[in-house]
Image (cartoon, grey):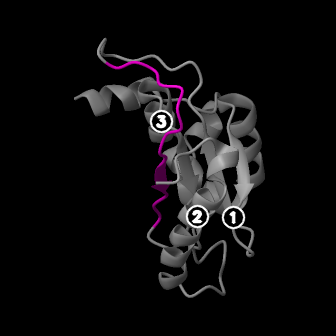
Amino acid sequence: MAAMASCELASGDLGNPWLDELPGVFAGAFLRKKIEQHFVSTLGGEVHTYSQTGLKLHFLQPSAPYFQSDHLERQESKKGCVVFLHGGGFLGGAPSQVYPYAKAVSHHYGIPTACCEVSCLLTHPRSKVPFESVEDARRCVNYLKDKADDLGLDRE
């Protein structure tokens, strides 16, 4: 029930009803740059390129989080990171599919989140899907480990 409430609070994440309602397969294939711009301007996120093939990682730091429980308090130390992978059956997809969840985790629980783009047939037709997609997820996590100090993350 709490997870469902978090998703309801997170609807309309990009502030543009048209972009918010697009299917991930379509958005990932055709509107990648526009969605990245909205992610940075609306949610205050950062976009990093984590692979040689140009795959992107959409990183969201918690900003002025509020907590639903009084026993949780904000810690200023380095934290771990929740990594989200988009769906799409390896045909297509985009990190924007998981923005509502990333925003909810980041803002409600004060944990940094990363929405990882992985290879799909529509966006990377020469990749060996799904094997490359799994490797992309590994590369994304390794990038976060390598950049942990810059991003304020706990490497462990």
Query: What is the spatial separation of the Cα atoms under label 3 and label 1, in whole angstroms?
Result: 20 Å
The percent position of residue 146, horizontal first and vertical second, equals: 64, 61
- For label 1, the residue is 50
What are the residue bounds of the magenta stretch? 72-88
Q: Which residue lies furthest to the top in this view?
A: 70
The x and y percentages for residue 154 are 52, 47
Residue name at image x 43 percent, y 25 percent: 108
Q: Name the residue under label 2.
A: 140
Give, as a three-letter code, the residue at label 2: Cys
Quadrant assignment, res 61: top right
Location of residue 36 with respect to 90 vertically, above or below: above
Q: Which of 117 and 135 is in front in this view?
A: 135
Label 3 neighbourhood size at 10 Å, few (<14), some (14-19), many (20+)?
Answer: many
Label 2 neighbour load within 10 Å: few <14, some 14-19, many 20+: many
Decide if residue 79 is on the left or right side of residue 42.
left
Kindly identify the amino acid type of the residue bearing the numbered disc 3.
Ile
Q: Say what secondary structure mark 3 lies in.
A: loop
Residue drawn 69% across the image and 31% down it: 44
Q: Can residue 114 be seen in this view?
A: yes
With 110 as the anchor, is 119 left or right in this view?
right
Q: Name the residue under label 3.
A: 111
Q: Which amino acid does label 1 sit on?
A: Tyr
Find residue 23 and report its horizontal and vertical position in percent: 53, 52
Determine the CA span between mark 2 and mark 1: 6 Å
